[in-house]
Image (cartoon, rainbow, N blue to C red):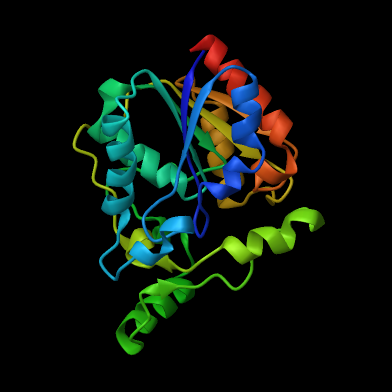
Amino acid sequence: MATFVIVHGAWGGAWSWNKTVVPLLRQAGHAVSAVTLTGLGERAHLGTPDTDLDTHIQDVCNVLFHEDLHDVILAGHSYGGMVITGVADRMPERLAQLVYLDAAVPSDGQSLADGWSPERRAELLARLEREPDGWRMTRAQQPPNPPELYDWALARRVDQPAKTFLQPIRLTRGETTLPRAFVYCSADKEPGSPAALRAEKIKNDPRWRYFELPTLHNLMYHAPKETVEILCQIAAET
């Protein structure tokens, strides 16, 4: 039996993984916790203008400490890759493996917004200065989801504090030496795009284990069984 902790992506919550993936992993005999980050999901009321990436990293570190978890396979989806990278820097002794689920893989000093267009970043900064609620970054649309889940998921997506996207990650230990795996969702990526180039680089890096699913970004909805199969394979080989 392995111990998984799963960190959701932007505008999401533990609900997105508790729908299917968490129950399937538990049926396979694993211990699983899906974390909801401050200001999101059922913790939406706790978000403030000062909620930032460090807050979200601390959210997960607190779970590891207070639940006294060890040898954890820590998985992050999308924005969650920022969070698990920071957790690995702060509490590597509690982790066995990192799994990036079509996720950000930041280096020291990078923020998620560094990968955005200059126009999108400038718009966010202008809103922060101009509007009292500008710290709430809205997501009017969501990635394509299965029709039967679209309304269900959209109703649960909430605004996310802007500093979580803007704050650079600080890694005091340098690049992690923990085992890492990357799961690439190829169906919605253009050849030559930054995401495709990153995946190709990781695929050819012997320090990584690489998996690819011909599915869309929200793999927990589009390919839950295949996602669980990969996670179970990682657990068996960790």
Q: Horizontally, is 177 left or right of 5 in the view?
A: left
22 relative to 164, above or below: above
Give x and y (percent) for residue 21: 63, 35
Name the residue located 73 percent from the left edge and 60 percent from the top edge: 150
Q: Please, which residue is most extreme toward the bottom here?
A: 130
Name the spot of residue 189 as percent of width and height, x first.
Answer: 68, 50
**Viewer-proximal residue among 54 and 26:** 26
Whether residue 57 is visible to the viewer of this picture, yes or no, is yes
Residue shown at 80% from the left, 57% from the top: 147
State whether residue 105 is above or below residue 99. below
* Residue 30 higher or lower than 46, as above or below: above
Quarter of the image for residue 25 reads top right
Q: Position of residue 30 (x, y in %)?
A: 54, 20
Q: Name the residue at 57% across, 28% down.
A: 203
Point 64% across, 43% down: residue: 19
For residue 211, side relative to residue 40 (left or right): right
In the picture as drawn, the residue positioned furthest to the right comes out as 147
Total marks shown come to 0
Task: Residue lying at the far left in this picture: please name it.
Answer: 172
Residue 175 shows up from this direction: no
